[in-house]
Image: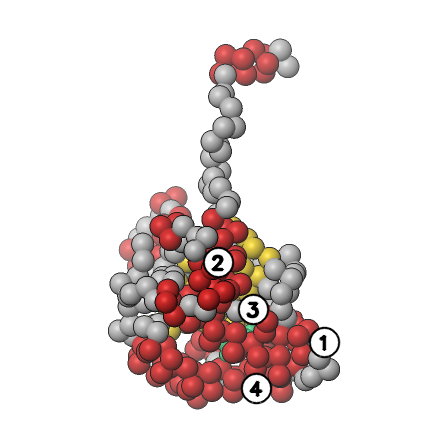
Amino acid sequence: MLPSGTLRIHELTSEERAVYATLKPECLPEHVAIIMDGNGRWAGRRSLKRFIGHQQGARSVQLVMETASRIGLPWLTLYAFSIENDLRRPKAEINFLMRLLKSFLESNVQRMMDNNVRIRYIGRTHELPAEVQEKMRWAEETTARNTGTTLTLALKYGGRSELVDAFRSLAAEMKLKHISPERITEEDIHRHLYTAHMPDPDLLIRTSGEMRLSNYLLWQIAYTEIFVTERLWPDFRGIHLLEAIADFQRRERRYGGLSEGSGEVDEEAERIKIAAG
Ligand code: FPP
């Protein structure tokens, strides 16, 4: 289902339009999640400081967000700052990332308004510096009535800590309502995740070639298609999002079922084989 905004295909670059023309618009993913990796390597390969890589990475966020909104992608969720980043990176880099986030919001809210993009966040965002939280709130409130793409930034995010938070709040609800553990369903867990308001990602993109999930959306990606590209995040553009979607559309999603043409199951023959050992 498309968000209630207008498609703006004419605003794509001619190269993007050429890739878009190969897509089936009725089979676009609803939700694309991205692990943005490789800022440091991008800078290192140019003998630049890591900070410059992050700065270029912020530019990629802006451009990818715009392409997503032009093709009417309802949900785009970006891994912008993990709990592990916070624990394991030098203080100076964390401070820089926080300043970069603030300035990204300041300079992009108008662009979000122009592109009908709404911004939201997931993660333990209450643990971020107060002035960053203030800017985040401002951006969220300013864009709250936009009806196009929802850009979600995962900040101070970890998949396991999201599950811990979900179980804590589910346990509190159960205690309050005197619900016994046997009655817990997947739907109950879903309701307590940070992402309760959105569909699970159809497509997860990871840049810079690592074959890891890095503690991202662990519950939500149970049936998500994964696309890994060698391209480093600061070099990732809207056209690469479209190429990933084209690859996604060539896949067949089975959700644990059978594919078409995988053959009839001959129950009698199977029984005989099993009986014969
Ligand atoms: C990985 O690069 C990227 C991050 C630490 C998170 C993503 C951050 C940005 C794209 C910066 C700006 C984002 C916003 C929303 C303003 P890395 O440093 O791990 O790269 P490396 O693995 O090559 O060292």
**Placement of the C terminus among the 4 image quadrants:** top right
The number of numbered badges drawn on the structure is 4
Image coords of residue 194 (percent x, y): 40, 64
Q: Position of residue 23 (x, y in %)?
A: 44, 53
Task: Label 3: state its secondary structure.
Answer: loop
Classed neighbour count for the residue bearing mark 3: other residues with Cα under 10 Å, few (<14), some (14–19), many (≥20): many
Q: Nearer the viewer, mark 3 or mark 2?
A: 2
Image quadrant of ligand 1 equals bottom right
Q: Nearer the viewer, residue 198 or 190?
A: 198
* Residue drawn where x is 49% and y is 21% of the image: 264
Question: Is tag 4's residue or tag 3's residue first in the polypeptide sequence?
Answer: 4
Does residue 127 lie above or below 230 as drawn?
below
Query: Is residue 59 depicted above or below 7 in this figure?
Result: below
What is the CA distance from the residue labelled 4 to the residue labelled 2?
38 Å
Q: Are marks 1 and 3 in contact (CB under 8 Å)?
A: no
Q: Are dots 4 and 2 in contact, CB under 8 Å?
A: no
- Dot label at residue 236: 3
Q: Which of the marked residues, 1 or 4, is nearer the chain's N terminus?
A: 1
Is label 2 in contact with label 1 (beta carbons under 8 Å)? Answer: no
Residue type at mark 3: give it: Phe
